[in-house]
Image: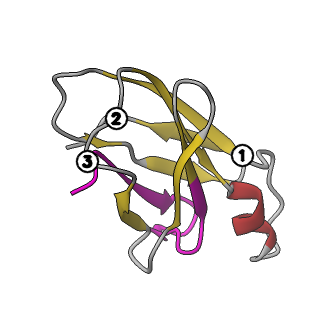
Amino acid sequence: MSLITTHVLDTTTGTPARGITVQLLGPEGAQIASGTTDADGRITELGPETLPEGAHRLVFGTGEYFASRAVDHFFPEVTLTFAVEASAAHYHVPLLLSPFAYSTYRGS
């Protein structure tokens, strides 16, 4: 199982956000992994089983998602920065998304 998983929900429709590209960037800004959300809005295998400590980023291609649906939007991408600790077993980083706002939390 990868250390990082994500789930994107489109809060305007109340449905999973399918087809969003996501990049996982490491502490130095280099891309570690990438993926695309499935029909359930999830990426369950994003990167390796372990990561170095430090700040990592998930970059979500939200502009392409909304543009493909002909929906006006404000954020061309959403970048979530979070701290990876050496003792952590798993990080689930969900994104609740609308065209003009977003929120996140650390899931399980």
Secondary structure state at the residue bearing disc 2: loop
Q: Which mark is residue 51?
A: 2
Q: Residue at x 46, y 67 (%)?
A: 14
The residues colored magenta run 1-22
Secondary structure state at the residue bearing disc 1: loop
- Residue with the mark numbered 1: 100
Q: Residue at x 27, y 39 (%)?
A: 50
Q: Residue at x 40, y 64 (%)?
A: 43
User: Is label 2 or label 1 in front?
Assistant: 2
Residue type beneath disc 1: Phe
Contact flag, marks 1 and 3 (Cβ < 8 Å):
no
Q: Position of residue 67 (x, y in %)?
A: 81, 69
Residue type beneath disc 2: Leu
| Above or below, 61 relative to 25 | below
- Residue with the mark numbered 3: 49
| Above or below, 25 relative to 49 | above
Q: Position of residue 27 (x, y in %)?
A: 52, 24
- Check the picture and name the quadrant holding the N terminus: bottom left
Q: Position of residue 35 (x, y in %)?
A: 52, 64
